[in-house]
Image: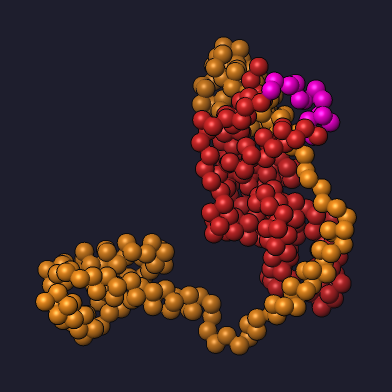
Chain colours: A red, B orange
Amino acid sequence: MVKDEDSFLIGRFKKGEESAFDELVNRYMKRIYYLAYSLTSNHADALDLSQEAFIKVYRSIHRFKGRSSFYTWLYRITVNICLNHLKKEAKIKEVSFDERIEVAQVDWWSNPKKALENKELQEGLTKAIDSLPPRQKTVFTLRHLEGLSHKEIASILGCSIGNVKANLFQALQKLRERLKGYVED
Amino acid sequence: MISCRKVKRWMIDYLEGTLSKKKKVLFKKHLSKCSRCAQEVEALVKTQRLVRLKAREEMPEGFWAHYLPRLKRRLEEKPLPRLEWRPVPTLALTTATALVLLIVVAVSLLRIPGLDLESLPREVLVEEVRASNSELDYFIADSFEPEEIVQALIPQEILDSLINSNQESTL
């Protein structure tokens, strides 16, 4: 259904209807912005890079043949822009996994609302995810924060499903180390 | 019993509940016998549950109201490049740029003071040039024999003049 609506909007935009592009932006701006934010952890960068992705879509819509869904294509563009930015800015800093996030022992999952509001926990989670290598961080973000399937992630990153699972496993292992204070009894 | 290695390979499917019934039985059987894997699974289950508690910092509605107008302004500031004016295909342009870069790398290598070019075997020189830029390696590796690269790209008279100037500078 969503795919059909996207195809309809893309068709209109290809025929020169600017308002169809506006509708596509309104439809996806939040998801793309938050994806960029998850990858960069910076609001200014997320705004700039997510808009860069839409500019790329605007300029190269004629190349979109509809073989994959529009959002897969849009996600691929966004992920590539963000990864290039991170590489350029050298924003990803490998964090030693000896450096663990120490926290008070609280049974967070029995009270998710409290967990969502807990600043210390949220900062700890952000820091831990930020410390992942770019590829693992991207796969992890697409799976756990964006809720995409393994197949969709593989399509976005141009890799196999096995590769996605391997990256997810490595990411989880690193997060387990970083978040030992929360996870261990 | 399945190996610990296989348990790791199946871990993500187990954690996400996509492991087949048959594999799940084997997986759990292994956990009942291997305390190390059982501990790891337990810790990863907890980690996965914990990271799902990560809240998303919502942006205010006013922010979204300005998103599209701002994007439109950026689109106006950066007009669409006129692709039809390009006289050569992108690949040809890239190839030319790559070859020019190769020559620059080769020339800079040849200008290293004190480098005795006459005694340097051609294959070594070629390998040095190629090692200086892996992207160029990738680009031309299938197109040229190593000996052909310097020969084809740097005319002998230029090579000779560089050797002469190098010798003068070291005198």
Magenta span has A115? Answer: yes
Nearer to us in this view, A128 or A4: A128
Q: Is residue A79 above or below residue A176?
A: below
Describe residue A91's horizontal placement relative to residue B155 as left or right: right
Which part of the image, by quadrant, shows the C terminus of chain A? top right
Depth check: B115 or A14 in front? Answer: B115
Q: Position of residue A141 (x, y in %)?
A: 68, 44
User: Magenta includes A84?
Assistant: no
Which quadrant of the structure image shows residue B148? bottom left
Residue drawn at x 56%, y 19% as measured from the top left:
B37
Residue B123 visible here: yes
**Relative to A104, does residue A158 appear above or below in the rendering?**
below
B9 vs B110, left or right, is right
**Residue found at x 79% / y 68%:** B70
* Boundaries of the magenta span: A104-116
Can residue B146 be seen here? The reply is no
**Residue appearing at x 71%, y 40% in the figure:** A144
- Residue B91 location (% of width, % of height): 50, 75
Q: Residue furthest top?
A: B33
Q: Position of residue A159 (x, y in %)?
A: 58, 49
